[in-house]
Every structure is written in structure tokens, then in C-alpha cells.
Amino acid sequence: MSLLKYSDYQESGVSWIGDVPKSWSISPLKYLADFVNGCVFKPDSWSESGVPIIRIENLNGSLNFNFFDGSVDERHHVEEGDLLFGWSGNRGTSFGPFLWKMPGHFFLNQHIFKVRPLHGDSKWLYWCLKAVTAHVEDQATGIIGMVHVTKGDLGAIKAPVPSFHEKVAIATFLDRETAKIDALIAEQEKLIALLAEKRQSTISRAVTRGLDPNVPLKDSGVPWLGKVPAHWSTGILSRVAERIVVGIAEAATHAYRESGVPILRSTNVRAGRLIGELLYIAPEFAAERGSKLISAGDLVTVRTGNAGVTAVVPSELDKCQCFTMLITTLLPGQHSSYYCYWMNSAPAVRYFQLEGWGTAQVNISVPILKNLPVVIPPMEDQVAISNYLDGELRRLDSLVEKSKNAISLLQERRAALISAAVTGKIDVRGLAA
């Protein structure tokens, strides 16, 4: 697509805008729209029926609504097509403008503005607010991904203002072109989901059937596991482990140090790998809890939340500790990598879901992990399966990474296109039709 420029530009005097077409003007947002904050609904005023209340989580498509069986000021009513702005939310997701697309009648909760255009051009205003959101995020305050902006600060932000016909052209162009980009992003996300399914099925098949498609099978004795190779054994994890214990399960913040003995947390554990920044505890505190020390090759398993997710401890973390996770030390003659794959496989995930307790989060214990059904191949099969899965998963993970990079580039392209059209860096008047 050939993207033309306007013939004449002028300085806008606003850093995030830059030069704008000479015929455009610059105006604070408060002169383009009225920002009305939502109503303050207290949890004890919610009801089982009535009018659904739009909260921050609903801006991202959640259908989990609370209801209010009463009346509120008409300013807080929302209908399909209304323009909203989440002024307190997560960067890049719930913070910024939204065109409400659900039919029906709703009430608006606090932390969201209802944006009422003063010149009847809500579609262009949506894209204008989309363009300024990145700038607003830079100016907004907040921590841990959450940002906030006041009505006064948002209204004071200056925006470029084209003619009415140019507004229509910009909105029409961006509606169409971003829909194309969104479709490409959706395809990449679908591919990532398919690769994740392929990854899990590859692991599950290898650890339950081995690598020989013609191997004779026998019943495993576990209904949800099915058949396994005839020359393999089955049992529970404690049969192949010399130790299954819980790590440090007491307050340890007083023992934190800038350096010392690494202590793993559940935030460090992903399926088959360790990530993130490590904390350290005083060596004397770790030594007093010597029964909890973790050696290289041990398995660490998350107890709460992502219950059952397991990783192998690498050699560089030999003699580390962990905080409230489960530690498995295998018997000699067993391969850590194979059992790590097993504990992250679909059959093991199913077991943890069935045996764990808790509603909001699944929890597992030492007895639950000890009684995890396992398939026990000969050592040479364990090594072969691990080597095979290492290679296959590297290939699949590489494809996932390429798709993620493609999504990142498409998102950058989308943001750049919106900014260029809204600020007049490209002339879309001839492209809108």
C-alpha cells in the first residue's frame, strides 16, 4: 500500500504529535469530549439480578458481571456503541479507550470514564484516544503494571484535530486496516495454541508409550493412563524416589541477603525450566535446615496455583533451598529429566487436578506427590525419551518464538499506523474508500 503525505505541515508544539498538516488544529481533549467517571458501586450493594455493571475486567471481554437492582444517574448508563476509557488499569490491556460492543443496557463502575464526544465523532475520537494512550501511560502513575490518570490530566492532553471529512476518512481507514492486522495476529495466536497442544501431546505420548510405535503394550492398571509398553514397570513416585519433602515453610524474610544460598520460589518454576531473579538467604540459616537442601538433579514441584509444575535443579544451583515447594530426590538409576517430563505431562496434570484441593487455586501435598502414578521405563529408555523430547521441544519452542516475534512486529505496525493516521503523518483521504 502506498501511503501518501500531506503537501504542507506545521509544527504542533506538542512533542508526542510532532508536525501536523497545515490545515489541522491542536486542542486539549477536554474541548473534544466530556469524561464522566463511573458510579461508585459498593460490593454490598450488588445483587443477583438487575442491570449488569461494567468493571475493568469486563473491558477485556469478561462476561463475569455483577448486577445492581436500582437506579443510577443517566450519565452512568452505557449502551452498545458507547465510548469508554479505562483510566485505572493494566498497561496495554485495560487502560485506554474501548468501544462497548455488547447489546443491552449497562451501568458503569468507577475507574472507567464514559466519553461523550462534543462534536459527534466517536469513532474518530476512539482512534485519537488510542493514539494518545501510549503517551498517557508514560505520564500516568502506578506500580506493578497498573497505571492511573486523572480526568484533569487526561483532559489537558493536546490532540490533533482534522476536518470532519478527514475524521471520517481516518476512522474508516483505521477500522479496515487494523482489522486486517488483528486477523493476522489472531492467526499467529491460533498457531501458538496449536503448537502448545502439539508440545503437550508430544510429551505425553513419549513418556507413556516410548519411541517405538510397534512396541507391545500392556494395561497400566491406571484407568486414566491406559496402556504402556509391556517391558516397562508402573508404580508411584515414592517407588523411584529416596526423598520427597517440602522445602522451607516458615518465614524467611529476616534471612534474606544480597548474596548467599539461592532460594527458589514458585515464581521461578515453569514446566521443565527455571526462570526469573533468584533471592538469597544467609548460609547459616540454610545450614540449620540441612534436610531441606536441594542437590543438582533434584526435582522441585509447585504446590499451590500451578500445582504439579516441575523443573530439574541445574548444577549451578547445587545445595540451594526452596520456599514452600516440594523436593524430590530420585533413587540412583533413575533419570531426572524423564521424570520431570512425566510430572509435566497431561496424565500427571490430570492426577494433580483430581487429587489436589482448593477452589480458587489447586494445592498439593507431600502425600499426593508421593502417590503420583508413574511409568518406569528402563534407564536406557528414560535417557532416549529425554533426549528425543529435548530436541522436539526445542523445535516447537522455536516456532512459538517466531510466532511471538511476528505478533510483536504486527502490534508495533498497528500502533505506528494508528499514530501516523491520527497525527496526519500519512494522508488517508484517498485510501478510506
Image (spheres, grey):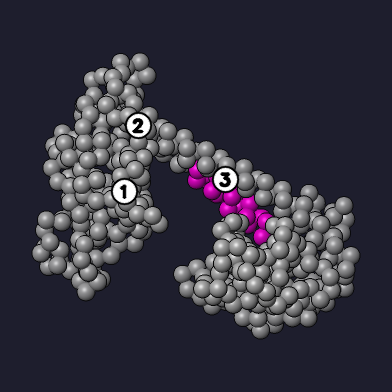
Q: Residue 154, image x and y in percent?
A: 66, 78
Q: Residue 19, image x and y in percent?
A: 76, 72
Q: Residue at x 12, y 61 (%)?
A: 289
User: Which labelled disc corresponds to residue 11?
Assistant: none
Front in this rendered view, residue 395 or 9: 395
Front in this rendered view, residue 21 or 75: 75
Label 2: which residue? 224
Of marks 3 and 2, the one in the foreground: 2
Q: CA distance from mark 2 to mark 1?
A: 16 Å
Q: Is residue 67 magenta?
A: no
Label 3: which residue? 189
Q: Residue at x 51, y 73 (%)?
A: 44
Q: Is residue 366 left or right of residue 142?
A: left
Label 1: which residue? 356
Whether 51 is drawn above or below 342: the answer is below
Please report whichever mark, 2 or 1, sits nearer to the chain's N-terminal start. Answer: 2
Q: Residue at x 25, y 59 (%)?
A: 324
- Which residues are the magenta region? 400-417
Q: Residue at x 20, y 61 (%)?
A: 248
Q: Is residue 218 visible?
A: yes
Whether 121 is drawn above or below 60: the answer is below
Please report whichever mark, 1 or 3, sits nearer to the chain's N-terminal start. Answer: 3
Disc 2 marks which amino acid? Trp
Q: Quadrant of residue 3?
A: bottom right
Disc 3 marks which amino acid? Glu
Tag 2, which secondary structure?
A: loop
Q: Is residue 296 visible?
A: no
Q: Is residue 374 left or right of residue 195?
A: left
Of marks 1 and 3, the one in the foreground: 1
Q: CA distance from mark 1 to mark 3?
A: 30 Å
Q: Is residue 408 magenta?
A: yes
Q: CA distance from mark 3 to mark 2?
A: 30 Å
